[in-house]
Image (spheres, rainbow, N blue to C red):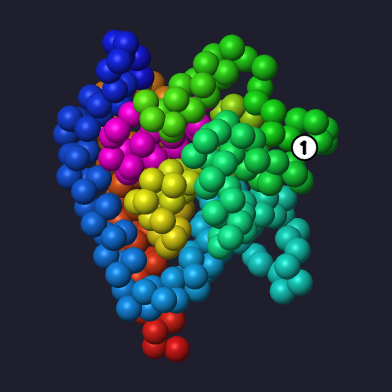
């Protein structure tokens, strides 16, 4: 993601085959679900259900359980972390985390890791601390610059890049997948692409988990075709996530 000084480092990505159209479709699908009758006033119910589905699917992508206990506790540490993250991305909690994300993305990444990895590390001092690696630090700094104004690409493209980069650099010793997917959700909410967090792209990523892993691995190579394929794949997931949100809203309206 290098560029000349002053240039938008992500601008070339929007010219890759299929990317602009995929981003437009994702934006239109999410915009439409926000106009669903059930979401004009009762969007908070859709958002809560969406966050739960997102948490379960995100855990499952990383091999975690999807079994939710009635007492609110979870036997599986991956699921427990993913659901803590889901709770942080729902309702008033989401407003707080989104505000942090807008001004200090690295702090938001650290907070997400604290939530996601609390049951996965032996040393609590590891929580929220990126690996002490110069390359990790420089790429996290670049992501922070992108998220605080260094790019003007469409939000679906930026969300895909943040997601792919966090998977690629694996800045923490654990729970990088849950953190990466949550960061992508924060791009969607903070940018206004999906301001209420109604979409559930995680369901599509889980249903197509083999493709998800293959495309993420290819993204890490930096090959232009692989970058375009990852971005369009993530946009397709946003479209699928909007359809999931619509099904939630339809159920709420008919209840």
Question: Which residue is more in the foreground, 101 or 114?
Answer: 101
Q: Residue furthest right?
A: 123
Q: Secondary structure at mark 1?
A: loop
The residue at which mark 1 appears reads as 121
Percent x, y of residue 18: 18, 39
Please tell me in which quadrant of the rendered image residue 127 appears: top right
The C terminus - image quarter: bottom left
Q: Is 244 part of what is drawn in magenta?
A: no
Percent x, y of residue 35: 30, 70
Q: Is residue 225 above or below residue 90?
A: above
- Residue 95 shown left or right of residue 68 in the figure: left
State the residue at coordinates (65%, 26%): 130
Percent x, y of residue 146: 41, 28
Principal secondary structure, stretch drawn in magenta: helix
Neighbourhood count class around disc 1 (C-alpha, 10 Å): few under 14, some 14–19, many 20 upward: some
Q: Is residue 13 above or below residue 33?
A: above
Q: Is residue 206 above or below residue 39?
A: above
User: Which residues make up the magenta segment?
Assistant: 151-169
Please tell me in which quadrant of the rendered image residue 104 appears: top right
Can residue 208 be seen by looking at this rendering? Answer: no
The N terminus - image quarter: top left
Percent x, y of residue 178: 57, 44
State the residue at coordinates (25%, 45%): 23
Q: Is residue 207 above or below residue 215?
A: below
Question: Which residue is more in the foreground, 133 or 222?
Answer: 133
State the residue at coordinates (31%, 59%): 30
State the residue at coordinates (29%, 10%): 4
Q: Residue furthest bottom?
A: 255
């Amino acid at each position: 993601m290098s560029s000349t000084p002053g240039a938008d480092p992500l601008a070339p990505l929007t010219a890759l085959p299929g990317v602009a159209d995929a981003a437009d479709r994702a934006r239109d699908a999410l915009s439409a679900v926000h106009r669903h009758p059930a979401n004009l006033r009762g969007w908070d119910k859709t958002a809560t259900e969406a966050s739960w589905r997102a948490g379960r699917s995100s855990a499952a992508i990383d091999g975690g359980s999807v079994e939710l206990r009635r007492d609110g506790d979870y036997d599986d540490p991956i699921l427990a972390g993913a659901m803590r993250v889901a709770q942080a991305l729902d309702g008033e909690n989401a407003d707080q985390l989104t505000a942090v994300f807008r001004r200090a993305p690295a702090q938001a990444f650290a907070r997400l890791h604290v939530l996601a990895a609390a049951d996965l590390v032996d040393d609590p001092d590891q929580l929220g601390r990126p690996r002490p690696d110069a390359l990790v630090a420089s790429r996290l700094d670049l992501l922070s610059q992108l998220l605080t104004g260094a790019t003007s690409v469409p939000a679906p493209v930026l969300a895909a890049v943040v997601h792919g980069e966090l998977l690629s650099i694996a800045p923490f010793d654990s729970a990088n997948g849950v953190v990466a997917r949550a960061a992508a959700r924060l791009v969607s909410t903070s940018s206004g692409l999906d301001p209420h967090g109604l979409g559930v792209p995680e369901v599509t990523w889980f249903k197509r988990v083999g493709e998800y892993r293959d495309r993420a691995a290819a993204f890490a190579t930096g090959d232009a075709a692989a970058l375009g394929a990852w971005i369009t794949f993530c946009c397709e997931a946003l479209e699928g996530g909007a359809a999931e949100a619509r099904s939630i809203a339809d159920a709420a309206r008919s209840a």
